[in-house]
Image: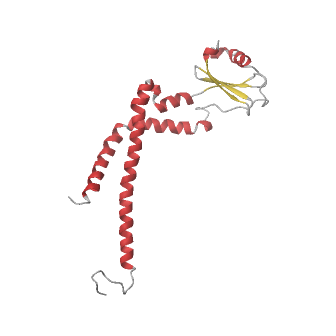
Amino acid sequence: MGSNDRPVHFNVLNRKIHYWASFIVAVPVLIIILTGLLLQAKKHWTWVQPAERRGSSRAPTVSLDQVLASVRALPDLGVATWDDVNRMDVRPGRGIVKVWLQNGYEVQVDLANAEVLQVAYRRSELIESIHDGSFFGGDWVKMGLFLPAGLTLLLLWLGGMWMWWVPFIARRKRAKLRYDLHHRPANAVDGSGFE
């Protein structure tokens, strides 16, 4: 076996791994890519995430109970207690609080007077759960399918870079050798010891 056999065998193995690994992880990786694109554009596409409104003042003057009362006053949302609230995002710089409800809706409330500024459905959390795989079966799918798919994608990238790098270096060496052969001085020794 020559010293050149190892890279050739590794390249053949690398191509076979690429072939089968890309087939196995195709669906999870496609889901990761598509939902990642949606999440990348979420601030620019109100279908994914509602646009952020501005309140009337930057100084918060309302209590959390007043915020809940404003949200409860919207009968279509079915909010009765704090149990119906998933979380809140207070933005004093914009004068609002975003109240994210368990049912997927987002209510933006003015921090100065507790006025409801906007009610809209927020899809970004759903898209995030699809993106990380937890939507399809919780942590089992997230850690058992989507994480290995992501790691496989990383290995495919590394293998692809290897398949690009080896020929790139070989071409550079050949080009340098050709250049050196054509541009050596006329009185250079040719290697035989004679000029």
Residue 3, by quadrant, is bottom left
Is 62 placed left or right of 120 in the picture? Answer: right
Residue shown at the point (36%, 54%) measured from the top left: 163
Residue shown at the point (36%, 87%) measured from the top left: 187
Counting from the top left corner in percent of width and height, residue 148 is at 39, 35
Q: How many marks?
A: 0
> Which residue is situated farthest in the top direction here?
80
Q: Is residue 163 above or below residue 34?
A: below
Is 16 placed left or right of 150 in the picture? Answer: left
Residue 38, by quadrant, is top right
Residue 45, by quadrant, is top right
Q: Is residue 2 above or below residue 41?
A: below
The color scheme shown is secondary structure
Residue shown at the point (58%, 19%) measured from the top left: 103
Counting from the top left corner in percent of width and height, residue 167 is at 35, 60
Q: Is residue 41 above or below residue 134?
A: below
Residue shown at the point (50%, 35%) measured from the top left: 35
Counting from the top left corner in percent of width and height, residue 117 is at 72, 26
Q: Where does the N terminus fall, quadrant-wise?
A: bottom left
Q: Give 180 or 2, whichever is nearer the viewer.
A: 2
Q: Where does the C terminus fall, quadrant-wise?
A: bottom left
Q: Give 30 or 12, whichever is nearer the viewer.
A: 12
Counting from the top left corner in percent of width and height, residue 62 is at 77, 21
> Which residue is situated farthest in the left direction here?
1
